[in-house]
Image: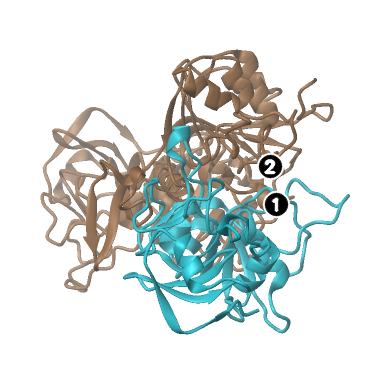
Chain colours: A cyan, B brown
Amino acid sequence: MESLADKERLPREIMAMRVAKELPDGSYVNLGIGIPTMVSSFVPEGRTVFYHSESGILNCGPLAEEGNEDIDLINAGGQYLEPVGGMSFFDSAEAFAMIRGGHVDVTVLGSHQVSATGDLANWMLPQRGVGNVGGAMDLATGASGVIVAMEHTDRNGEPKIVQECTFPLTGKGCVYLIVTDLAVIECDGQGLTLKEVAPGWTPEEVQQLTGAKLTISPDIREFEL
Amino acid sequence: MPGTHLEPASVAQRVSQELFSGAVVALGPGLPCYLPDALPDTSGVWFIADSGALGSKGGEAHGSAVDAGENSASLLSGGSFTGVVDVAGILRGGHTDIAVLQPSQVAANGDFVHWTSEETAGLFAPGSAVDMAYGAATVIAVMPHQYPGGRSNIVSQCSLPVDGAGRVNIIITDVSVIKVTAAGLELVETAPGWTAEEIIAITDAPLTVSSDLKGMTFNVPTLEPTNKVYSSAIEALSDVLEGSIINVDGFAGPGGMAHYLMVGLRDLGVKKLQLISNTAGVARVSAFGVPNIIDHSILVENNQVVKATASYPVSPSASRPSAFEEAYNRGETELEVVPQGTLAERLRSGGAGVAAFYTPTGAGTLLGEGKEARIIDGKDYILETGLRADFCIIRGYKADTLGNVVYKGTSRNFNPVMATAAEITVVEVDEIVEPGQLGPEEIVTPGLFVNRIVVRPADFSAYLEI
């Protein structure tokens, strides 16, 4: 029998594509570093999403083309951006007033762990003794909802979705949707519901790689793009 | 028969004698609005109107500027517009030297009543007078000595709700100058034609007469803008002391970072610095920069840093540690990790005179431990305190000689916030221009927050030689 560890999982692009489907037309969205950053490339046609970045810019354009890099035009991940009409600049206090004040509709973040009640732990690995919180705690607390986009298990194959986080928390009960390379899981603050599984995966297999109890949705389906 | 009552312009001339070069002066409505006209346009005094105009001057209409009395006002070269929240921050944050107000009553102990009068008693409309009175180092009350009916505006005790308790330092009326002292009111000057006895007779509060009683004069002092332009980073930072707390600007990458000032600070070699900064130097070891870009690491490597207060203190990758992380692991530095939005708001609060605030960020986490927690409307909050530094080094694009600063793109980030939260703020820019060359609506950091300006030399490289 094929081991679950070796079984093919979804690539990051597909995860990003799946998250992109969740962004409402006209919404203000903050994308974290990593897989979340890729989401902007997959927003369905006809939908307009305004990107906010903690570096102090609203309505971010696409990544800058080679040769067009400008140190005065970056996103929070330090990537260079293309200038676009309708972008605006502001200072850090205002950037975070937008976040903390609930003016940013959706945040997409990566994470080390997510708990059964939607707690997020993404800023510090205890073994390092020091961590970069950056804007993560503000985003977790302030945005109207956090979508987590992450691999289902860590590099040792351990579940990243757990009953209770063992790493230092970023925010409590802030995650409402988890998109991994195996599944789409809803968090309602009480527990987790498995909504979609990657092609070739069964709900039982996903449960085996998950550290918290999953309720299987009555209309469970394959990843929907 | 006493002398006549002074005209408002003469009172303003007398008030002008209380100003000094570079003074930041908040003007309430009424008689205070005559003050800017008493001075030449080049005085360099910063007038603040609660309408949001900085560097405004009463008189002919100009654009959409209004003063505190809703009169149209002209904006001096180098003036700028700002929002009412920023104005309140300027007032509350200790950036104002003098407030000039027209109270309706001043009491012997310096209490004053601003908007309320007996006709409007019950209505309470302090406007920004309260912020002005509590934020300014010195409060000057400018007022007619008496109501039109002859009753005294200076009283033993205010008969109406006070807007500022014990805040008035000097009273300048249309007939006298009176100092508010711990022992009570002291008459120090009388208007032409008035005797001390005549002033005492129309004053409804005990008044002692100064042994040095003088006649009021109306000569206007010669004031000049403070020179803020320094020739080098080292000159601009030469008085940074060992143990100073320093705001260091920048988000994470090379943009918005005052590389030239950082090198100056390193070359000065001053030790035991405590940095308040978004990162503790990650540009050299992360995707935010390039391997040989100058960042905070040059100070850490020179053993100058004993503490960092930062949101993103270390390299994103443990396998590529920054100089700060290595020093931290050796036990040479302290670290206070603060969520980025909390860091920005703590600086904003520090700069705006707000001691502390409740924020949801960090509640229930490691970073909220030990902090006062409170549930407000069913939501968890923690108390965070304002931050303020001794020095601040920021990176602007252009500044005018008054210290007004504009920024480029995302390189604004922490710069404008940090500029408000330090005793001495030094800005590094590409270019210095004359007042008026930066548009009032374009100015992000008004010059009253900026003490020193240096130009990044054309041949300066932000890259280390390797």
**Badge 1 density bin: few <14, some 14–19, many ≥20, Cα 10 Å:** many
Residue A74 numbered mark, or none? 1
Query: Residue at 70% of width from left, 38% of height from top?
Result: B254
Determine the chain carrying the residue at label 1.
A
Q: Is residue B110 visible?
A: yes
Mark 1 in CB contact with mark 2 (< 8 angstroms): yes
| Residue beneath disc 2 | B288
Relative image position of residue B295 (x, y in whole percent): 65, 30
What is the quadrant of the C terminus of chain B in the image?
top right
Q: Is residue B158 left or right of residue B389?
A: left
Image label count: 2
Query: Residue at 62% of width from left, 72% of height from top?
Result: A200
Query: Residue at 40% of width from left, 49% of height from top?
Result: B91
Vertically, is B78 above or below B323? below
Q: Is residue B459 left or right of residue A104?
A: right
- Residue type at mark 2? Phe
Vertically, is A117 above or below A220? above
- Dot 2 lies on which element? loop
Foreground of the two, B285 or B420: B285
Determine the chain carrying the residue at label 2.
B
Relative image position of residue B421 (x, y in whole percent): 46, 39
Vertically, is B96 above or below B125? above
**Marks 1, 2 in one chain:** no
Relative image position of residue B434 (x, y in whole percent): 73, 43
Vertically, is B345 above or below A108? above
- Residue type at mark 1? Ile
